[in-house]
Image (spheres, grey):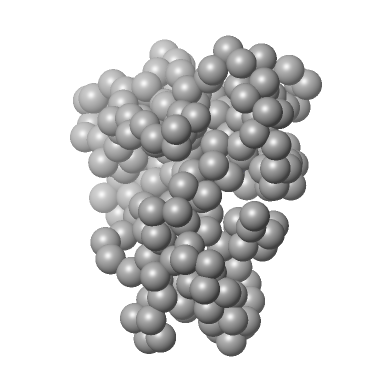
Amino acid sequence: MSSFTEENYLKIIYNLSAWQEGEVSTNALAEQTQTRAASVTDMLRKLADKNLIHYKKYQGVRLTPEGERVALQVIRKHRLWEVFLVDKLGFGWDEVHPLAEELEHINSEKLIQKLDAFLGHPSADPHGDPIPDPAGRMPHPEHCRLTEVVPGQAVVLVGVTEHSAPFLQFLDRTGLTLGCRLEVVEVNAFDGSVQVGISGNAPQFVSQAVARNLLVS
Ligand SMILES: [Zn+2]
């Protein structure tokens, strides 16, 4: 059985490797976990001893199949709890991430099976992130970032890659909800901001930083 912190490390390594090729660096982990490189190294030795990661000093880390299995279980629990909190308890999508960070560490296979069935086996969480199936297979839906969409194209908002409350509250105020229709009118060549029509309303500008965190298909 892995501890709370070990599970978080495995999850972070999984997420970092999803965005890059090859090994995850100790520095990237120190940055993500906001701990000193020395403490990161201690934890990595522990995880390697348990055969959850491949780790060689100065070469970075990679999950073993068992490490990946644990990471995907934690991610599955996190996302199912987020669905529960929003759909059944009425939380906003801007409130659930910190709560799910705690709930994801409850270790009961029976609880999570019942939760999954109770929710009707959802395929995505309230932020549009896919939910791994009980066997730990992660679906990979087709999507791109709003910054990659050429003007004149119409797309649908299917996910967000930033889960912080201020970001999600901004989306709420702007009418950017999952499933809404977006029409890219123009990309500002100077600062990369995107002029976009949201659900058929008059076009408005969103900053490049916002557009980069919107996934569309
Ligand atoms: Zn979350």
Up the image or down, 164 lies above or below 67; here it is: above
What residue do we see at 67% from left, 21% from top? 114
Up the image or down, 150 lies above or below 191; here it is: above
Query: In front here: 117 or 129?
Result: 117
In the picture, residue 126 is in which quadrant? top right
**Residue 134 seen anywhere in this rendered image of the structure:** yes
Quadrant (top left, top right, bottom left, bottom right) of the C terminus = top left
- The x and y percentages for residue 88 are 73, 17
Number of labels in the image equals 0
What residue do we see at 62% from left, 39% from top? 78
Query: In front here: 19 or 2?
Result: 2
- The x and y percentages for residue 62 are 38, 65
Up the image or down, 69 lies above or below 85; here it is: below
In the picture, residue 152 is in which quadrant? top left
State left or right for residue 75 relative to residue 151: right
- The x and y percentages for residue 175 are 55, 24
Quadrant (top left, top right, bottom left, bottom right) of the N terminus = bottom right
